[in-house]
Amino acid sequence: MIGIGNVLRQAREAKNLSLADVEKEIKIRSRYLEALENEEFDVLPGNVYMLGFLRSYASFLGLDANELVGQLKNHLHPEDEEKEEVRARPAVYPSSGRSIGKKVKLLAVGLAVCLAIAYVFSAVTREPVPQVADVPVETPAVEEAPQVSEGGSEEGEAVIAPREEGLELVLQVSDQPGSRCWVEVRADGEKIFSGILEAGARQSFTAEESFWLKAGNAGVLSVTYNGQEWSNIGRVGEVVVLEFPPENE
């Protein structure tokens, strides 16, 4: 025992609060709060969330959160921190080559269109004008050459290269007091955000092909992907990992 649990319990009882009361205020499960007071750290989901829960609990009780977090860090074994770092590090997904393939296809299409335009223009300029014989007959009407637009292509349906549409991910934290959520976001396999979003915070991200999301307090977080809201991604205190687009799309 390092004494952190007793400090938390005494502060809570001094305020005449139950674990259920604290859970309602700071959105952390009572069983995790009880584990902190009993110093049963193996019950908690991991060092990152354990330190975050301790900081939120201590701040709510009016204690020096930095001092208690520092004591807990000193208590953790170095090998435990190393294992936690390895376990918390998300898998890195190899970047897809589809974007390169699309660019190559677009270049090939553009080159083919340019060659076709050049061929048509060359054929029009080389077409000989038919000679009219010196006989008293009606001169046949000469067919007009196809009109060429200023851009060099014949009038007709234009070839438009397809436009790639990006993806959008919007995160919204509940505005209830004490609501806060640690999140990590990866766009196209590259980490673009890692940190804590406070109550009422709203953050948006963009990607070309995919998102990877990890949330440490899913019950207070709403997710909107390409305009579609995912409001119930988990419970308060639950750690969830989501990937977009979903596998069923």
Image: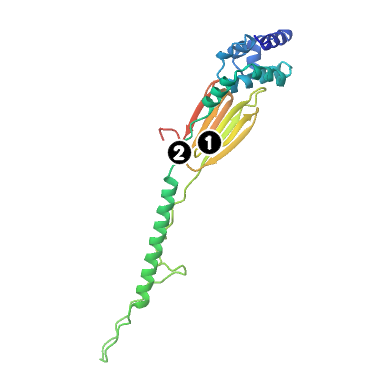
Q: Amino acid at mark 1?
A: Arg
> Which residue lies at the image location 59% right of the left edge and 24% below the top edge?
220
Q: Secondary structure at mark 2?
A: loop
**Foreground residue among 54 and 175:** 54
- The vertical placement of 61 against 181, above or below, is above
> Which residue lies at the image location 72% right of the left edge and 19% below the top edge?
67
**Which is more N-terminal, label 1 or label 2?**
2
- Tell me where residue 75 sits by quadrant: top right
Q: Which residue is mark 2?
A: 94
* Residue 33 showing in the rendered view: yes
Q: How is the image coloured?
A: rainbow
> Which residue lies at the image location 63% right of the left edge and 25% below the top edge?
180
> In the image, residue 40 lies at what x, y percent?
59, 11
* Residue 232 showing in the rendered view: no
Q: Which residue is mark 1?
A: 186
Q: Amino acid at mark 2?
A: Pro
> Which residue lies at the image location 49% right of the left edge and 30% below the top edge?
242
Label 2 packing within 10 angstroms: few (<14), some (14-19), many (20+): few
**Foreground residue among 87 and 153:** 87
Image quarter of the N terminus: top right
Q: Is residue 139 left or right of residue 213?
A: left
CA distance for labels 2 and 1:
12 Å
**Foreground residue among 146 and 29:** 29
Label 1 packing within 10 angstroms: few (<14), some (14-19), many (20+): many
Q: Which mark is residue 146?
A: none
